[in-house]
Amino acid sequence: MLNEKKNDDVVYSFKCPSCQKGTIDIIKNIYDLPDGDKMLILKFECNICNFHKNDIIPLTTNMEPGTMTLQVTNEKDLKSKIYRAPTGKLAIPELDLIVEPGPRADFYYTNVEGILFRFEGAVLIYKKNLEKNDPEITEIEELLENLKKAMEGSFKFTLKITDPQGGSYIIPQDNSKYNFRKIEENKLE
Ligand SMILES: [Zn+2]
């Protein structure tokens, strides 16, 4: 399935589970990364309603361990694709967001927007469980305010993934905002 296919192939179609009317085409796209690696991007898109989903799967394994950072300063940057392998630690320091690596951590492919969205969900649940007079509420509300701005592209932040084994990826919308710093072998020992 992964070889000898051209870009943007429709590989499968089925009826949309959301609107029951549209047809969802699964579109397969092989993305060549600047360093020679390849990613498989699967797009699910309904031709009638808004239902859609993206999956990113790395096709090559010769990825270098390192820290990748993405400066997110506008709405376009939110569409940058993110793939966090189980060994990767994801952080947005400006929003106190940390996704720790671990054996239980799921593979995680989405875009920046998707990460903010999931984080907002988690923060809302956390807030719900606080007592009304908890002093932490003010802090949480401020965080939610910043998150909202971030999702509109009007709050600047840095998304950072550190992966000591390689395997995690950021595919930036704007290459000038992306940086990769290799982890030297001697630092791993
Ligand atoms: Zn639909």
Image (cartoon, rainbow, N blue to C red):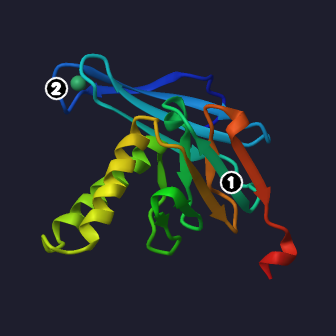
- Is label 1's Cβ within 8 Å of ligand 1? no
Numbered disc in front, either 1 or 2? 1
Q: Amino acid at mark 2?
A: Cys
Asked whether 96 or 136 is in front, the reply is: 136
Q: Is 71 left or right of 175, judged from the image as shown?
A: left
Q: Is 185 left or right of 120, judged from the image as shown?
A: right
Are the residues tagged 1 and 2 within 8 Å (C-beta)? no
Residue picked out by circle 2: 19
Q: Is residue 95 above or below residue 179?
A: below
Residue at 49 percent across and 65 percent down: it is 98
- The picture places residue 159, in percent across and down from the top left corner, at 57, 52
Q: In the drawing, what numbered circle is on residue 68? A: 1
Residue 92 visible at all = no
Q: Earlier in the sequence, mark 1 or mark 2?
A: 2
- Is label 2's Cβ within 8 Å of ligand 1? yes
- The picture places residue 181, in percent across and down from the top left corner, at 78, 56
Secondary structure state at the residue bearing disc 2: loop
Q: Amino acid at mark 1?
A: Met
Residue at 70 percent across and 68 percent down: it is 164
- The quadrant of the image that shows the N terminus is top right
Residue at 87 percent across and 77 percent down: it is 186
Residue at 46 percent across and 36 percent down: it is 154
Disc 1 from disc 2: Cα separation? 38 Å
Label 2: few (<14), some or many (≥20) within 10 Å?
few
Q: How many marks?
A: 2
Q: Is 100 left or right of 23, judged from the image as shown?
A: right
Q: Is 43 left or right of 174, judged from the image as shown?
A: left
- The picture places residue 6, in percent across and down from the top left corner, at 62, 22
